[in-house]
Image: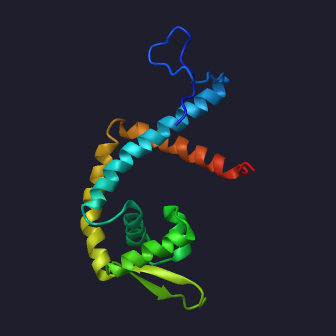
């Protein structure tokens, strides 16, 4: 990941002579710094979450599907896709894998023959009921570097930032 600021001219130890110094305005440097920090924080916490579910033969995306179905009940595949942020092909692949493990089943939609629901099987429900409390504790532990009040404030700020970014047109 790119570093938002270049080393100072008096700090030459370990500097790559082919590196290019880039001058950024404060707002751009701040945004890039925050992006790097967010990415690293996400990676660090996700490593704990992924290791936890991997002990049970699951990926984070698979667990995300199970957890969403556990807490929300049967959902259209498109709804699950949006909730766990994967492509339409990705959701099909993941649901196929979970169905092969006997954790999820597909159900037809009575009002739209093209639509399909994903639902937990009894085995899937039992697994999530067993795993979720421990998984939640693992994530909580990974985030204990900041207090609950700070987590709430950061969550509110990140939601606002995400909504604002989502409202912007993507670059061409």
At which x and y percent is residue 120? 37, 78
Total numbered labels: 0
Name the residue: 40% across, 68% down: 71
Does residue 73 appear anywhere in the picture?
A: no
Looking at this view, is 6 or 142 the one in front? 6
On screen, residue 51 above or below 97: above
Horizontal side of residue 119 vs 23, given as left or right: left
Q: Extreme top residue here?
A: 10
On screen, residue 133 above or below 69: above
At which x and y percent is residue 18? 57, 23
Horizontal side of residue 67 vs 10, given as left or right: left
Name the residue: 29% across, 54% down: 51
At which x and y percent is residue 154? 48, 40
Q: Extreme front residue here?
A: 18
Q: Extreme right residue here?
A: 172
Does residue 127 appear anywhere in the picture?
A: yes
Horizontal side of residue 136 vs 105, given as left or right: left
In the rendered image, which quarter is residue 112 located in?
A: bottom right
Name the residue: 34% across, 55% down: 50
In the rendered image, which quarter is residue 144 located in?
A: top left
Name the residue: 59% across, 48% down: 162
Looking at this view, is 56 or 165 the one in front? 56
Q: How is the image coloured?
A: rainbow
In the rendered image, which quarter is residue 82 located in?
A: bottom right
On screen, residue 59 above or below 126: above
At which x and y percent is residue 57? 28, 66
């Amino acid at each position: 990941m790119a570093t938002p600021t270049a080393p100072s001219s008096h700090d030459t130890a370990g500097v790559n002579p082919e590196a290019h110094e880039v001058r950024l305005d404060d707002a751009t440097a701040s945004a890039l710094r925050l992006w790097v920090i967010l990415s690293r924080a996400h990676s660090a916490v996700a490593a704990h979450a992924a290791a936890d579910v991997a002990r049970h033969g699951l990926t984070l995306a698979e667990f995300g599907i199970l957890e969403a179905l556990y807490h929300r009940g049967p959902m259209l595949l498109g709804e699950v896709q949006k909730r766990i942020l994967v492509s339409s092909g990705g959701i099909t692949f993941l649901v196929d894998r979970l169905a092969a493990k006997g954790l999820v089943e597909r159900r037809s939609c009575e009002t739209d023959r093209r639509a399909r629901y994903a639902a937990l099987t009894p085995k899937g429900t039992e697994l999530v009921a067993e795993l979720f409390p421990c998984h939640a504790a693992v994530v909580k532990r990974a985030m204990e570097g900041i207090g609950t009040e700070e987590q709430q404030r950061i969550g509110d700020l990140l939601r606002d930032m995400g909504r604002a970014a989502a409202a912007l047109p993507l670059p061409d």
